[in-house]
Image (tube, rainbow, N blue to C red):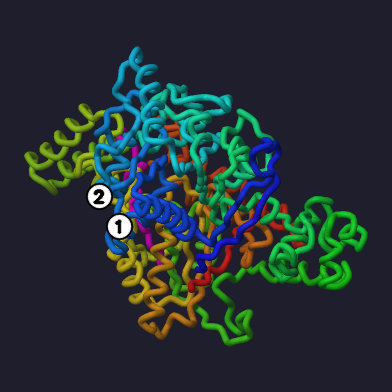
């Protein structure tokens, strides 16, 4: 993908007299390109300050968002000669109370992801102290502010953004002039952190954070946001009013702040979503191509609550789309073109049909060999269960590859129940000696009894949880019609840390994907394109599939040119209607069968124990609502009415 950004300025809602009236935004094609661009900004600053004989004072952030930045800085250090000896670093925040060696500590995060891999002087690293007593907190916060001033102030502050709009841990209500302090975390923030702590109950309720005022004193600020899950709050921060309810909105009032986004995170901004409302497209470097025309027509139909074929010239003229008619013809011509494009996305034969040519006119191969990649052992049925059943029923050779074990999503109580069953099973059939049965049983019981919140599971417990997920996945796949010998468990190494934070994607991960593809030689591949996954596993799994396909293309795999790759969405979000290239209709019976397939994942049904994203009932409801809403939208646009639709877009690997 291209690393060149689409850059634009957005008018600030309330600029001060000393700041520009526009917010700088750079949109990159993907998260890797966005992160690399920020790393280059940091590296350029570090080198420039070093050439001047001065320190580069950096404000740094934690979480999954800046990992790409830190990976690139480490690469530049190892391969590009970048030295960080002149860097003085101040981190935004730390949970309180929190030991620096704890798994969730930001001290540990920064060491593992950046500081241990570069030549920064440990004496120049500053992170709020999560071990101070409550009585010591005010003095510690004042000392932190003093150290920033003594360093000459922050040259460049790196930020992420939370779902509440927080920067650092400045939750809604944080005033513009706030300084480093102890703050109570918002419930949404604690829910988002629940998986890191193996349960919301284990998430600290407070944190020490730089204040909004502290952040705004940085000479330059870069806010990095990635994924669809950040699109709404990015829009509020960039285009909404400046308000303490969204701390990131204060960046509109900074003289040198910029938002660096991937396309998904930028999706709700007007220059991306509705550029026709901002003036002539040519002045924005855009043109009325098929993709933008489809987006505009669907937007207009939804805005007016009209079927596409009932839109008239006046509708276009009165809603800022006169230029579209000038470029593409009358409302009738534009309507028909978009309507037919949408109609042709609907297919009850996702794998093709014997005797029917492909959409490009070439002869099709039916039945096909098909590989469905599932990041976790349930994403296949949650996201495309109806299509999976359809492909099997229509005679295709369907393989399902579960990319990760998903073991951290199994609760200890479930694991103990299964361990007890296995022990009794082994005794009943004499499969293991009593001593060996007791050894395993007691080891697991002993570990669970003494396990601390957030502690990594013992190897035995991890293995039990892995087997639970495997058995559920096999049962669900078998119910959908997938033959047992075509179910593959890849257990990609990047995932197997026993904790939510994973290793970077490595050659070993990509090799597993490529080897499976070479064995099967599919004509169709399905993979998860859901980048809203809150912990990034889907994003990494898609990167592995894309990298494997590129590697196979480089090797000249003869079967690859005849293979098409489709992306489905997970439980968090659906493709926008203008993006959809394949829509598979589901009957009421198929919706019921999909629900049953999801419920095979029994270990994911513990919402009472662990409120958060891992719950089969919640997944079923989200998936079913999403599929129904897609069908209802197509119906409102004037297309055939169905009970539900599963949507896909084509992956074009370059």
Above or below, comparing residue 96 to residue 248 in the picture: above
Q: Position of residue 116 (x, y in %)?
A: 24, 47
Say how many tags the image has.
2
Q: Position of residue 369 (x, y in %)?
A: 44, 75
- Residue 506 picture quarter: bottom left
Tell me if 6 is positioned left or right of 430 in this view: right
Residue at 64% x, 43% y is 238
- Residue 279 picture quarter: bottom right
Residue at 38% x, 53% y is 473
Give the camera-side residue of 269 and 365: 269
Q: Is residue 104 visible?
A: no
Tell me if 176 is positioned left or right of 75 in this view: right
Category of crowding for the residue at label 2, using alpha-carbon neighbours closer than 10 angstroms: few (below 14), some (14–19), many (at least 20): some
Above or below, comparing residue 97 to residue 454 in the picture: above
Marker disc for residue 634: none
Q: Position of residue 80 (x, y in %)?
A: 32, 63
In the rendered structure, are the residues bearing label 2 and label 1 in contact, judged by CB atoms less than 8 Å apart? yes
Distance of mark 2 from mark 1, alpha carbons?
Answer: 8 Å
Quick one: label 2 or label 1, which is nearer the N terminus?
1
The single residue placed furthest to the front in the displayed view is 52
Q: Is residue 97 visible?
A: yes
Residue at 64% x, 30% y is 243
Category of crowding for the residue at label 1, using alpha-carbon neighbours closer than 10 angstroms: few (below 14), some (14–19), many (at least 20): some
Residue 163 on the magenta span? no
Residue at 52% x, 63% y is 567
Q: Position of residue 224 (x, y in %)?
A: 50, 48
**Which residue carries the number 1 mark?**
77
Magenta-drawn segment: 399-413
Give the camera-side residue of 406 and 46: 46
Q: Secondary structure at mark 1?
A: helix
**Which residue carries the number 2 mark?**
119
The single residue placed furthest to the top in the displayed view is 135
């Amino acid at each position: 993908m291209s690393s060149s950004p689409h850059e634009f300025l957005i008018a600030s809602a309330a600029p001060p007299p000393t700041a520009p009236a526009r917010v700088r935004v750079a949109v990159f094609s993907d998260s890797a390109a966005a992160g690399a661009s920020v790393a280059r900004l940091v590296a350029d600053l570090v080198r420039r300050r070093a050439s001047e004989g001065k320190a580069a004072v950096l404000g740094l952030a934690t979480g999954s968002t800046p990992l790409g930045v830190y990976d690139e800085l480490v690469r530049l250090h190892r391969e590009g000669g970048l030295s960080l000896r002149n860097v003085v670093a101040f981190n935004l925040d730390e949970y309180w109370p929190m030991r620096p060696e704890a798994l969730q500590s930001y001290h540990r995060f920064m060491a593992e992801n950046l500081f241990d891999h570069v030549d920064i002087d440990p004496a120049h690293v500053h992170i709020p102290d999560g071990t101070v007593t409550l009585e010591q907190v005010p003095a510690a916060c004042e000392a932190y502010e003093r150290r920033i001033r003594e360093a000459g102030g922050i040259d460049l502050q790196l930020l992420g953004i939370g779902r509440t709009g927080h920067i650092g841990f400045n939750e809604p209500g944080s005033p513009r002039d706030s300084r480093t302090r102890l703050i109570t975390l918002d419930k949404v923030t604690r829910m988002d952190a629940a998986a890191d702590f193996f349960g919301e109950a284990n998430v600290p309720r407070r944190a020490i954070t730089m204040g909004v005022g502290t952040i705004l004193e940085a000479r330059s600020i870069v806010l990095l946001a990635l994924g669809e899950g950040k699109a709404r709050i990015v829009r509020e921060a960039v285009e909404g009013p400046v308000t303490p309810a969204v701390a990131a909105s204060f960046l509109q009032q900074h003289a040198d702040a910029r938002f660096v986004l991937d396309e998904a995170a930028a999706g709700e901004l007007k220059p991306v979503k509705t550029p026709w409302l901002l003036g002539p497209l040519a002045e924005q470097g855009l043109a009325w191509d098929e993709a933008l025309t489809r987006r505009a027509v669907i937007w207009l139909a939804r805005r007016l609550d009209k079927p596409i074929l009932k839109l008239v010239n006046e509708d276009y003229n009165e809603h800022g789309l006169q230029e579209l008619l000038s470029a593409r013809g009358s409302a009738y011509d534009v309507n028909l073109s978009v309507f037919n494009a949408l109609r042709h996305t609907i297919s009850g034969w996702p794998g093709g049909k014997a005797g029917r040519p492909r959409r490009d006119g070439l002869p099709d191969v039916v039945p096909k060999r098909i590989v469905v990649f599932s990041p976790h052992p349930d994403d296949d049925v949650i996201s495309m269960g109806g299509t999976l059943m359809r492909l099997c029923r229509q005679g295709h050779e369907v393989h399902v590859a579960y990319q990760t074990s998903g073991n951290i999503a199994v609760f200890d109580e479930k694991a103990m129940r299964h361990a007890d069953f296995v022990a009794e099973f082994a005794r009943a059939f004499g499969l293991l000696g009593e001593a060996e049965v007791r050894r395993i049983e007691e080891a697991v019981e002993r570990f669970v009894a003494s396990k601390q919140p957030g502690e990594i599971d013992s190897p035995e417990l991890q293995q039990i949880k892995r087997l639970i997920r495997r058995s559920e996945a096999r049962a669900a796949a078998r119910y959908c019609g997938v033959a047992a010998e075509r179910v593959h468990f890849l257990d990609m190494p990047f995932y197997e840390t026993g904790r939510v934070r994973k290793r970077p994607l490595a050659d070993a991960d990509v090799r597993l994907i490529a080897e499976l593809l070479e064995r099967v030689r599919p004509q169709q591949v399905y993979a998860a394109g859901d980048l809203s996954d809150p912990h990034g596993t889907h994003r990494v799994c898609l990167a592995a599939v894309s990298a494997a396909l590129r590697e196979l293309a480089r090797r000249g795999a003869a079967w690859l040119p005849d293979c098409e790759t489709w992306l489905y969405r997970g439980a968090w979000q659906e493709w926008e209607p203008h993006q959809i290239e394949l829509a598979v209709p589901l009957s009421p019976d198929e919706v019921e069968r999909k629900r049953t397939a999801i419920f095979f994942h029994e270990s994911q049904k513990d919402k009472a124990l662990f409120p958060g994203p891992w719950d089969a009932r919640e997944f079923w409801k989200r998936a079913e609502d999403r599929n129904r809403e897609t069908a209802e939208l197509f119906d409102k646009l004037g297309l055939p009415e169905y009970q539900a639709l599963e949507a896909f877009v084509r992956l074009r690997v370059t």
